[in-house]
Each structure stands twice: as structure tokens, then as C-alpha cells.
Image (cartoon, grey):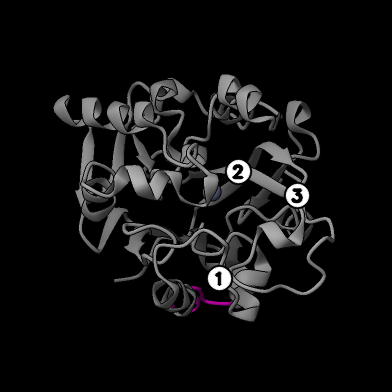
Amino acid sequence: MSEPSQHTIHILRYAERTAERQHHFYGAVDRPADPMPISYFVWLITGPHGPVLVDTGFTRATARRLGRAYVASPRDAVRAAGVDPDRIAAVVLTHLHYDHAGGTADFPAASFVLQDREMAFWTGRHARQAASRLGLPHLVLPEDVLAVCAANFAGRVRWVDGEAEIVPGISVHRVGGHTPGMQVVRVATALGPVVLASDASHFYENVERGRPFAVLDSVAGALQAFADVRSLASDPGLIIPGHDPAVLDRFPDAGLDSLSGHAAVIGGAP
Ligand SMILES: [Zn+2]
């Protein structure tokens, strides 16, 4: 069966902050104090089967509390890209960290695609310790997990254990490593299969040099995730890291007035 390849991906930056290299890598790092800013994205996929959004970002209130520079809410960014956020029926949550799962309330018509293991972990006995280790208690917010619980009771969670096709040409794949149920998204495009790696590789440097990010569930899992992501992509250049500002230089600007300099497009006319 041939894969549909008509998908377009909008890479939408909704927030950013300054940081240093030493914040981003597990273990010792070269040039630790060099600047290494981090961007926060959601990814909007459009195609013949309706829009699919990957991740929901965090809210303006969370940005203010944590000192992140907010560009636009993911809801407004989706609208700027020409899609009505109230009509998005499928949202993939790559994992439940605050910067990916904090905006579920902004997509009221959506079902959320989530790995069993991710929810099991963050509702399980080690959630509290895992959220507060490394001095980063904001990494998973109870209210974000509770919102997904409520969505589940409303029949709005699509559970996955491993891999699943969301619509023809768009599939999710559990890779683990960063969190227990971390999943990536493979998208058929005119350029070939693109892998939205999310936090399986925060930066190009993670996957390209085999260097895991500082926040880890498992070192071996993170290394295996790099291999899995590489095998899912048709070309290493079509692996899209989750937080690297450089993606906006490597792909054409999306030409969205309200997100000038913050949005790129893959697989479609800008
Ligand atoms: Zn993240």
C-alpha cells in the first residue's frame, strides 16, 4: 500500500529562553558556559485526513511563572497557520512534561494520543520523585496530568502501547529514553518520511553526536531512541528535534505575519 505524502508540517515556536550548553547534556560537556538557547515548539500537520497537532505547549501563566519568553499561545499559533483550533480532532502528546502537555484545555474537540506507559508512570508511585529530581519540580505539573485524566473519563484519550497509525501517513512510535512513554511522530511528506522527534532529541546535537539530553529516564533508552528515530526517518535531515532553534534556519519560513521568524514549513508551499 502506498503512503499518502500530501502532508504539510508547520513548526510553530511558541516560547523560548536563554540557556547554556551545560544545561542540555547528560554528563560532562565541552564549552559548558557557551550560550545555547532553547526554543519551545508545537507541530501542526495538515493533509487529506484533517489536521493533527503534535503537543500543546504551556500556558502564558506558566511562561510568566517560569520566566520563559512567550511568543504566542499554541492555540493562537495554530490559528495563525490557518487552522481553527476548535476543529482539531487529534492531538498527539509526545510525553507529559509541562512544555508539551500544558495546553490540552485549548483544544476542546480533540482526542489525545498518549502512550500507556507515559500515563502509568506519571500516575504511579514514582511520579513525585521523578518530577522533583534535578531540582526541576515544574517538569510535570499535576494539573496537566489531571486534565488528561478528565479527558480519558470523557472518552477523549486514544491509548497506544508501542506504535499506531493516527491517520494514513501519520504514525506514532514509542521510543522511551527521555520519559517512560516518550513517543515520536512519523509523517509522510513529499520530501519523504519526516520524524518529529520531540524530546527524543532536543537539539540536532543530541541525535547527531549520540549525546543524551540532561533529563533522562534511561541512558540506554535515550541511546536506543536515537537509533529508532534514525531508522524511522528517510534522511537524517528530516529528523526534527524538539527544542532546537536551528530548525527555523534549516526549513523555509512559513510566512505567517503574526509569527514572523517563529514558524517554518516542511513539505508544502510557504
Ligand atoms: Zn520538552
Q: Tell me if residue 198 is in the magenta stretch.
A: no
Figure check: 97 above or below 260: below
Ranked by sequence position, the earlier of labels 2 and 1 is 2
Which is in the foreground here, disc 2 or disc 3? 3
- Position in image of residue 20 (x %, y %): 77, 55
Q: Secondary structure at mark 2?
A: strand
> Which portion, as a residue range, is magenta?
230-235
CB atoms of marks 2 and 3 within 8 Å? no
- Position in image of residue 96 (x %, y %): 39, 43
Numbered mark located on residue 212 in the image:
1
Q: Tell me if residue 234 is in the magenta stretch.
A: yes
CB atoms of marks 2 and 1 within 8 Å? no
Disc 1 crowd, CA 10 A, few/some/many (<14, 14-19, 20+): many
**Residue assigned mark 2:** 41
- Position in image of residue 51 (x %, y %): 43, 38
Q: At x 40% / y 30%, what residue is drawn?
A: 88
Asked where in the image residue 60 lies, by quadrant, the reply is top right
Q: Name which residue type carries label 1.
A: Pro
Q: Secondary structure at mark 1?
A: loop
- Between 191 and 18, the residue placed more toward the observer is 18
The image quadrant where one finds the N terminus is: bottom left
Ranked by sequence position, the earlier of labels 3 and 1 is 3
Distance in Å between CA atoms under marks 3 and 1: 17 Å
Disc 2 crowd, CA 10 A, few/some/many (<14, 14-19, 20+): many
Horizontal side of 81 relative to 193 (left or right) equals right
Numbered mark located on residue 74 in the image:
none
Numbered mark located on residue 19 in the image:
3
Distance in Å between CA atoms under marks 2 and 1: 19 Å
Ranked by sequence position, the earlier of labels 2 and 3 is 3
Q: At x 65% / y 80%, what residue is drawn?
A: 209
The image quadrant where one finds the C terminus is: top right
